[in-house]
Amino acid sequence: MSKIQISLGEIAGRIGGEIINGRDDMLICAVAGLKDAKEGEISFLAHRRYLKDLDSTSASAVVIPRDISFERLPAVRVDNPYFAFSQLLHLFHDSPCAARGVDPGVFMGNNVHLGNDISIYPYVYIGDNAIIGDNVIIHPFAFIGNDTVIGNNSVIYSNVSVRERCRIGSRVIIHCGAVIGSDGFGYATHQGTHHKIPQVGGVIVEDDVEIGANTAIDRGTIGDTIIRKGTKIDNLIQIAHNVSIGENCLLAAQSGIAGSSKTGNYVIMAGQSGVVDHVNVGNKVIITAQSAATKDIQDGETVSGMPSMPHRNWLKAMAVFEDLPDIKKRVAELEKRLTDMEGKQ
Amino acid sequence: MSKIQISLGEIAGRIGGEIINGRDDMLICAVAGLKDAKEGEISFLAHRRYLKDLDSTSASAVVIPRDISFERLPAVRVDNPYFAFSQLLHLFHDSPCAARGVDPGVFMGNNVHLGNDISIYPYVYIGDNAIIGDNVIIHPFAFIGNDTVIGNNSVIYSNVSVRERCRIGSRVIIHCGAVIGSDGFGYATHQGTHHKIPQVGGVIVEDDVEIGANTAIDRGTIGDTIIRKGTKIDNLIQIAHNVSIGENCLLAAQSGIAGSSKTGNYVIMAGQSGVVDHVNVGNKVIITAQSAATKDIQDGETVSGMPSMPHRNWLKAMAVFEDLPDIKKRVAELEKRLTDMEGKQ
Amino acid sequence: MSKIQISLGEIAGRIGGEIINGRDDMLICAVAGLKDAKEGEISFLAHRRYLKDLDSTSASAVVIPRDISFERLPAVRVDNPYFAFSQLLHLFHDSPCAARGVDPGVFMGNNVHLGNDISIYPYVYIGDNAIIGDNVIIHPFAFIGNDTVIGNNSVIYSNVSVRERCRIGSRVIIHCGAVIGSDGFGYATHQGTHHKIPQVGGVIVEDDVEIGANTAIDRGTIGDTIIRKGTKIDNLIQIAHNVSIGENCLLAAQSGIAGSSKTGNYVIMAGQSGVVDHVNVGNKVIITAQSAATKDIQDGETVSGMPSMPHRNWLKAMAVFEDLPDIKKRVAELEKRLTDMEGKQ
């Protein structure tokens, strides 16, 4: 895709690295994985487990950690080669494009405030009193509700709905089909009828949050659902009403958090995991795949299973799980042998 | 948000309650939770577990059940304070707005029947022969297929797709991104090829149903998928072809029901739970979080686990689960001790 | 719905069957299940477990396998009655409609290539350099990104997003709300900040693939996410970046595959099942409902549980699971009895 060439010297400068075995003016045309890289391309060693791929790569240069000795190819030494990889992808693939302005096919409500250098594609709906920050990009079929704020440099992809009175921070990315501000799932059951509880709160999405495709984040009943800064949310995730998610969390696809639960910072939820309602999940907690936090979880714990238990205990128990039929049989045999012996005494 | 003030007397009248410790003309400006309420606001005691919050709330008045004695603040006694809360939210937050009619930016098929006092936003597609009831609100980027019926007072949010020949009842709410009437997942595998089985049935959504964001409800293969009246469906839920869901069920987020299964009335499915295909789930059944009903379930049962078992059995077994490695070890020790003893005899 | 009548002779010809007990000129007006069929309709025996329904059906004719003897009704004998059923649904329900061309309300980018006999509904966005094949149908609010290819005879339903540089094959069906080409979930964490890794790969969807409502398929980080020919993907499924799915797989609703994992051909994933990242799943593997493949799985295996184990072992262990509290109690009793006996010696 990229047709540009960048010198190894410029690359080293951009990623804060030191060149060994090579020359500054060597030209690089792309970045690729160790196994896929071809001549003219640069690759990287993300983890020591790929050392053998480093020895056989066809790349013309590599990015390696500072503590590896390597002589076969020109290399750039850095502290964190995986981070350097992300920087290299920006270097080779970011294509600055001029703001396209507001397409005439945009429906613009009353009293909308538009920032500078925005790009709003055709077939976008922007409600009354919305505030759209500088450099914002909004793709087709996106719905921005009344009184909603989209911060500077944020990107809203196609078919996204951000309903009324939500506040989206700066540098936020919302992927196709995501829904922000849908009604929470709340009913008061009275005489056999489920009466809808009006959901009059909002959603606050802080700076540098990313929200995946077809994810749903409900508004608060009263008060707000909050996603704090730097948190990354994958596809098809459910965030219920009045949930509060801390900073810099990573939520993998198809996980879900039920109503009014709170998480600390740097929490990791693996795929298809859950948090039940009204619990507190501490800082740096990890909830493993298909598991659920069913009670408060202390800082730093890794939990697994449903109901949740310390990951180590779960691992040990699951290691024995397949032996269950054998254990049951052995217990019956023991009972028989013991009864026989008791009879003999 | 609300700037109105409502007297305690009017509040008591609306929620059918009796004022104690206070005056009818006391003015209330908002409703809030016990912990969040401020001066001038009214709060409510939803459950006895929050009695201590009642004692410390800064609210100016509270709604309490009839059987609580409480003297610190003006209070309104009702049968069901949580239901009163939902009524209060309507009282303070419902803003009647005039129907906006049909925006010129709506695509209208042939022979569409439009009810009175409807609000159809720009960028809505309405197919041929569709029938739109009175007071219906349809938000941008909603697709209404040919021959589909939307009943009176229903609300269709943005980016919703209701495909052809579906029948949506009255007072139905369909949240952003939901899909009604997608093809069921049916194939006839013949000589190694999966041949699509045309899905020619429809979907019937009865009155007072609510359908969450990004939920998918497939049409029947032949015959209809049915959601009966009063049932509430949360976000990101899968309802497969020819499923029949009873009245007044509550399905929490990310749950799913496979093809041709049926549920009775007042069934509760917790988050991330499932029902396998071709089973019957009785009335008032509860399927707990991350569990699956893998066979027919009798009326009134609560089931857990996968495969499903009585909740009580599951709880007891899970309480012992972490002991599995210890149990295995103890069995081995018993065997050794018994063998030793047998050797001595 | 269908008002047509088709002779039994024509039906037999179309499904490659042989008529017994009946006449070629008998007229059939619809196809229905054994229990639902009425006079004038034809039904089918999909499985021997429905033999008693065959004896009581009110259908006027039935499709049966060649090895069944049956005399009560006119019948058509075929190799695979369920496949014949799918053919009959096409016969009675397919309504050829003329291509509607490109609606004036379509936003057409620069340098788009349009095939013959296409139908593009209003409110569709087609990006620059997109290629739309012959006979393609694109419904309202579908977004087709720059440089994306849609193969011949494919159907894109409403509110679908196919982002830039994706290649969709021929005869592909993408249901409402699905997202193809969203960014993969990749971050390089450096000094406490999660830095987004640009996702510069694409998605390749081969011929005859079907993709369900609100499913999300992420683009590759570098290189492509691939769905091979004939694979059918249900609703609300997550396919992460750089996943490769083989041919003719069946993925049921709410299942998910994490980053860089690969499957062979004819893999079946049941509802709410998963595959963790970086594993290889062999040909003809079955992953049962709510289970996860947590390591490489060999060809032909059926796995269950989390972590995954052979299905047979899982079944046996789950059959004993409810006995766990009893087993623990019996072990304690054995210990007591043995200690008593040891004391007596």
Image: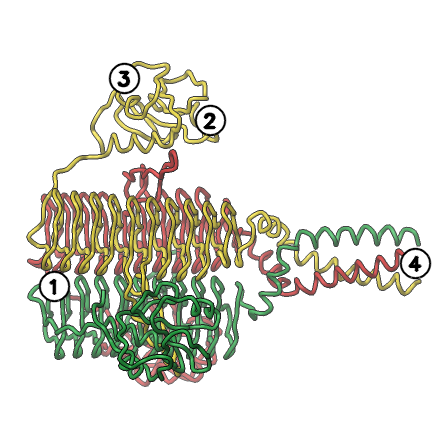
Chain colours: A green, B red, C yellow
Q: How far apart are the alpha carbons under marks 1 and 2?
A: 58 Å
Nearer the camera: disc 4 or disc 2? 4
Q: Which residue is mark 1?
A: A122
Question: Residue B26, can we see it?
Answer: no
Q: Which mark is residue A329?
A: none
Q: Which residue is mark 3?
A: C26
Which chain does tag 1 point to?
A
Q: Residue at x 93, y 62 (%)?
A: C345
Which chain does tag 3 point to?
C
Report the amino acid beneath label 3.
Met
Please state the total of marks drawn on the protein image.
Answer: 4
Report the amino acid beneath label 2.
Lys
Evaluate if marks 3 and 4 touch, with contact meaning CB atoms under 8 Å apart. Answer: no
Q: Position of residue A308 (x, y in %)?
A: 53, 67
Q: Position of residue C180 (x, y in %)?
A: 27, 57
| Above or below for A64 versus A316 | below
SS under mark 1: loop
SS under mark 4: helix
Would residue B199 be found to the left or right of residue A308 on screen? left
| Above or below for A91 versus C170 | below
Q: Residue at x 20, y 44 (%)?
A: C152
Q: Quadrant of residue B129?
A: top left
Which chain does tag 4 point to?
B
- Mark 2, Cα crowd under 10 Å, few <14 / some 14-19 / many 20+, is few
- Mark 3, Cα crowd under 10 Å, few <14 / some 14-19 / many 20+, is some
Task: Please determine if labels 2 and 3 lie on a single subunit.
Answer: yes
Q: Which mark is residue C52?
A: 2
Evaluate if marks 1 and 4 touch, with contact meaning CB atoms under 8 Å apart. Answer: no
Q: Which residue is mark 4?
A: B344
